[in-house]
Image (spheres, rainbow, N blue to C red):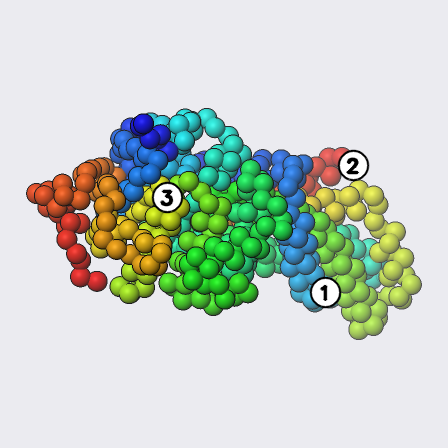
């Protein structure tokens, strides 16, 4: 009767096993520094143009859509506050994480999946390396370090986008007022929330990508399936988790 | 003096979901043996070799390597045991991101128990590549090589650690007959020059026939007819359908088994 639950539960069990091993490996030699820096470059530096562009337009679009409502209440001067709170708490982390999931979670699943189906993962184990240590842990570390940094870049670009639309295009308020309200609106818990989220999302999207890659089977078709699943599952988790992390911070206040 | 057992399967069963890949299989591979594992696609040859190496864990039964029961042995300790075994994977298993030199040197640099000094890596890699007649390809990437060359790099990587035991998974699959013959000559050469215990999975009778009836003469640099005491194992759906010498194989009346006792048309 509960047969339909067996597949997902088994999958979850394998995923938890991988997570524990990947985390334990952070504190265990050998560390593959080359792989870590290569992944940092790929995930961090490689995503910068994308994050600059999407960050800029996210801030621009929030300002644009908010302008009418703010005008109605005569609160147009508060636009900096709105943009900075929505970006730092929510949209910066979530949108950046979803972009990086689309770019890197899928990349990890397809790269590790191809390695799995061409027996390169077996070869690693046969030739004296732990594939989790060599492949998963470096990707986990690199994403956990780079995603919060990318989010900072994205948040800043969003504010720049908000400033351009709010102060230059629509003339809602002055530049000084925009930046002052944006800065004053944030307290420590907003910044903590805004950096904790990408850290958690980074762990989820790298581990999910690696998990589907390491468990790919059935040739090239299996690699394609693993890639799709990795992106879908990471995005769903990101959206679910942002809610729960948000609740946690609201309870805290 | 009775030779020691290198791999011993005791009633091993391996399942994938509801699919039984190896069923209650008992097998013994002793030092100095040549064992040819024949079977159709999907009969369990790859699973058998990976289980021998501890890459797949049996659901039932036990596997002993070099006389040591591997049940409950931690993965880190298994890696030490595997350092004494060379394997050529069916799909080659070469790392696409590494050059031929780094691929062949990989076990020397990563298998800590081999204690290979760093300055010895390059000479040993070159020696292994010369053995497979690919001395000039060090800087190339696997994707730049032909199928036959990739297999030869795979063999070089398997023998570079000078293991006592070599496992070859379908080394001739997907190759033309001439290239396949060259690969099989290398397998026999390694066996007869270094006396390596050899287990070879294949679906081609010709491969087994060559290993069973020819020996490599190092001074002449070619194969010549000779006794090898090769044993044959025929797998059918994860079960042993036949085990014995070539004469017994050829005498078998079983319809499935006798398919592997005569040359196939490639
Ligand atoms: N990772 C796996 N997941 C599920 N089934 C597998 C896996 N590996 C092998 N099998 C199944 O085990 C059986 C034996 O496969 P294999 O040993 O690869 O055959 P072959 O003799 O062609 O090498 C096949 O039915 C195959 O589908
Ligand atoms: Mg096979």
Q: Position of residue A102 (x, y in %)?
A: 57, 58
Query: Which mark is drawn over residue B195?
Result: 3
Distance from disc 2 to disc 1, alpha carbons, whole Å, reads 32 Å
Distance from disc 3 to disc 1, alpha carbons, whole Å, reads 62 Å
- Identify the residue shown where x is 57% and y is 55%: B122
From the image, tell me which residue sits under label 1: A52
- Going by the image, does A95 lie left or right of B82? right
Density class for disc 1 (Cα within 10 Å; few <14, some 14-19, many ≥20) is: some
In this view of the protein, which residue sits in the foreground, B77 or B247?
B247
From the image, tell me which residue sits under label 2: A253
Does ligand 1 reach within 8 Å of label 2's beta carbon? Answer: no
Subunit of label 3: B
Foreground mark, 3 or 1, reads 3
Q: Secondary structure at mark 2?
A: loop
Do tags 2 and 1 sit on the same chain? yes
- Identify the residue shown where x is 58% and y is 35%: A20
Q: Secondary structure at mark 3?
A: loop
Farthest-out residue, left: B253
């Amino acid at each position: 009767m509960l047969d339909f639950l067996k597949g997902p539960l088994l999958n979850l069990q394998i995923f938890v096993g991988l997570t524990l091993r990947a985390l334990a490996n952070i504190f265990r030699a050998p560390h593959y520094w080359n792989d870590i820096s290569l992944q940092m470059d790929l995930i961090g530096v490689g995503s910068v143009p994308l994050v600059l562009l999407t960050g800029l337009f996210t801030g621009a679009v929030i300002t644009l859509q908010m302008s009418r409502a703010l005008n109605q209440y005569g609160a147009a001067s508060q636009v900096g506050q709105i943009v900075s709170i929505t970006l730092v708490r929510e949209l910066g982390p979530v949108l950046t994480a979803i972009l990086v999931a689309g770019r890197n979670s899928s990349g990890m699943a397809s790269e590790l999946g191809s390695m799995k189906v061409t027996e390169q993962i077996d070869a690693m184990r046969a030739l004296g390396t732990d594939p989790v240590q060599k492949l998963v842990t470096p990707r986990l570390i690199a994403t956990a370090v780079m995603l919060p940094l990318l989010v900072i870049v994205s948040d800043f670009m969003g504010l720049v986008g908000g400033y351009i639309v709010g102060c230059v295009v629509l003339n809602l308020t002055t530049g000084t007022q925009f930046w002052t309200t944006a800065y004053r609106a944030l307290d420590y818990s907003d910044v903590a929330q805004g950096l904790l989220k990408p850290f958690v999302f980074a762990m989820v999207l790298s581990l999910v990508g690696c998990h589907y890659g390491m468990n790919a089977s059935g040739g090239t078709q299996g690699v394609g399936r693993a890639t799709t699943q990795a992106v879908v599952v990471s995005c769903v988790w990101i959206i679910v988790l942002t809610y729960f992390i948000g609740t946690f911070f609201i309870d805290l206040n | 003096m009775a030779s020691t057992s290198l791999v011993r399967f005791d009633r091993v069963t391996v399942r994938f979901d509801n699919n039984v890949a190896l069923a209650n299989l008992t097998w013994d591979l002793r030092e100095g043996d040549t064992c040819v594992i024949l079977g159709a696609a999907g009969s369990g040859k790859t699973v058998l070799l990976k289980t021998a190496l501890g890459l797949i864990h049996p659901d039932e039964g036990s596997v002993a390597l070099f006389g040591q029961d591997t049940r409950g042995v931690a993965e880190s300790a298994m890696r030490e045991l595997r350092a004494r075994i060379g394997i050529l994977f069916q799909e080659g298993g070469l790392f696409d991101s590494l050059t031929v030199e780094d691929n062949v040197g990989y076990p020397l640099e990563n298998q800590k128990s081999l204690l290979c000094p760093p300055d010895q890596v390059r000479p040993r890699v070159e020696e292994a590549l010369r053995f497979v007649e690919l001395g000039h390809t060090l800087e190339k990437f696997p994707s730049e090589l032909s199928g036959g060359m990739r297999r030869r790099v795979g063999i070089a990587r398997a023998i570079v650690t000078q293991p006592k035991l070599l496992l070859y998974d379908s080394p001739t699959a997907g190759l033309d007959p001439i290239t396949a013959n060259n690969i099989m000559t290398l397998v026999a050469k390694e066996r007869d020059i270094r006396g390596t215990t050899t287990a070879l999975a294949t679906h081609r009778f010709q491969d087994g026939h060559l290993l069973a009836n020819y020996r490599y003469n190092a001074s002449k640099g070619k194969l010549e007819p000779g006794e090898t005491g090769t044993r044959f194992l025929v797998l059918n759906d994860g079960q042993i359908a036949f085990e014995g010498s070539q004469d017994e194989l050829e005498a078998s009346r079983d319809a499935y088994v006798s398919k592997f006792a005569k040359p196939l048309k490639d």
